[in-house]
Amino acid sequence: MATLTRVGREDALRITRVVELRDQLVGAVLAAMEGATPMGFASLAEVEAFLVSTTGEEVAARGTQGKIHHVDPRMLVSWVRDTIGDAELAASLDVVVDSERPYFFLVPEMKQLIAERLAQCEAAQSQE
């Protein structure tokens, strides 16, 4: 997995900002008995917190109570690039998505990349 280059304070503020309602990324909680419950995400931190690495076996073991937190990986890449304005993170996420592996295998890597960027942003903001 690619290592992201450090960001400066100005970039960190832009990357961690809360976006307007019309610019939110939409994901969903998928549940066997409830269907899909749409969720809106106004920040990269909200997306990172929402992404949960769950295997098919774990969902099956929970039966009708099993839930999957889903964000369309291609939509995530576009949102990070076009709305958040982080082309480097978007490119790194795109490499993960291009592997075309099942969603359950993509989530840990996507989450790790986003968490890395958020940690860099936190560090950049605390330095000044």
Image (spheres, helix red, strand yellow):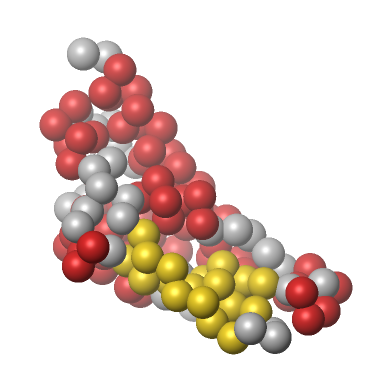
Q: Is residue 2 visible?
A: no
Left or right side of 98 for 33? right
Q: Quadrant of residue 67?
A: bottom right
Residue found 28% across the figure and 64% down from its top: 24
Picture coordinates of residue 77, whole percent (x, y): 31, 65
Picture coordinates of residue 112, whole percent (x, y): 50, 47
Q: Quadrant of residue 42?
A: bottom left
- Residue at the limit of the structure toward the left, as seen here: 10
Q: Nearer the viewer, residue 46 or 118?
A: 46
Tell me: residue 45, above or below residue 122.
below
Left or right side of 39 for 127? left
Q: Is residue 119 visible?
A: yes
- Residue at the limit of the structure toward the right, as seen here: 61
Left or right side of 96 for 4? left
Residue found 82% across the figure and 79% down from its top: 63
Picture coordinates of residue 58, whole percent (x, y): 79, 68
Tell me: residue 123, above or below residue 105.
above
- Residue at the limit of the structure toward the top, as seen here: 128
Tell me: residue 127, above or below residue 38.
above
Tell me: residue 120, above or below residue 123.
below
Q: Nearer the viewer, residue 109 or 23?
A: 23
Residue found 17% across the figure and 53% down from its top: 85
Picture coordinates of residue 95, whole percent (x, y): 39, 64
